[in-house]
Structure formats: structure tokens, C-alpha cells
Amino acid sequence: PTLKFIEASGQTHVVEAVVGQSVMEAATGHLVPGIVGECGGCCACATCHVYVEEPWCGQLDPPDEMERGMLDGTPGVTARSRLSCQIKVSAALDGLVLRIPAAS
Ligand code: FES
């Protein structure tokens, strides 16, 4: 599946992801700037924060309690915020569009 990342500057990165990996892994594997994945995907750093674009926002599994708790303490959080390490790539996500928060 193809994922599209849009930086705060408008620069876009189209990435071919592998089913079963996380969106964070797809981004870091392709050196998408602004997604760091410092904790390696265990929901403990929030350096993989992204905004999910419509219409995808309502189509993902909602964040679990741990992810919500982590997002709570993350600057710039909106209703579309997710931790990309908690989004699992599936064929159904082909075309998913994610915006990367401006560097803080
Ligand atoms: Fe650390 Fe997602 S990679 S919370």
C-alpha cells in the first residue's frame, strides 16, 4: 500500500509500505523527515505524531488507552492526531494521507 506524508512545509513523500509494519516504520524506513520513532514503536515517545487526513480519520481503529494517554501530553494535538507507530499498515490503507506536525 502507498502512504503519503505531507510535511508542514507542504513537501510530500509518497512511500510504499509493507502490510503488517507500522506507519511509523514505513516513514522511518524511507527517511521521511519529522517522524523519528525514538522509542521504537512502544507508544512511549510521541516522536511519531501525525495528523490523519480526511476521509481516513474516521476509518482507522481508534487509539487505545495507552495511545490516548501518550497523545494527551503531546504538543499540538488535535482530534486527528495519532501516533503513527500505533497504526498498522494494511491493504485497506492504500492511499492513506498523513500530515507531519511542524517541528517544535
Ligand atoms: Fe514512540 Fe510512536 S514511536 S510513540
Image (cartoon, helix red, strand yellow):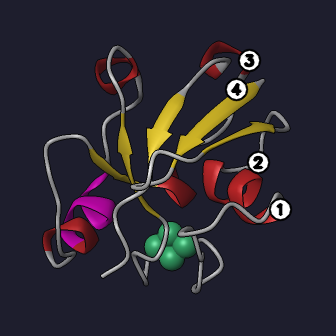
Residue 21 numbered mark, or none? 2
- Distance from disc 4 to disc 3, alpha carbons, whole Å, reads 4 Å
Q: CB of residue at label 3: within 8 Å of ligand 1?
A: no
Q: Secondary structure at mark 3?
A: helix
Q: In terms of depth relative to the viewer, which is nearer, 74 or 21?
A: 74
Give x and y (percent) for residue 87.
53, 44
Q: Quadrant of residue 93?
A: top right
Name the residue carrying label 1: 29
How packed is label 1: few (under 14 Cα within 10 Å), some, or many (20 or more)? few
Q: Look at the image and give the residue range highlighted in magenta.
A: 64-69
At label 3, the amino acid type is Ala
- Distance from disc 3 to disc 1, alpha carbons, whole Å, reads 18 Å
**Residue occupying image coordinates x 34% and y 66%:** 102
Quarter containing the N terminus: top right
Q: Secondary structure at mark 4?
A: loop
Q: Nearer the viewer, mark 3 or mark 1?
A: 1
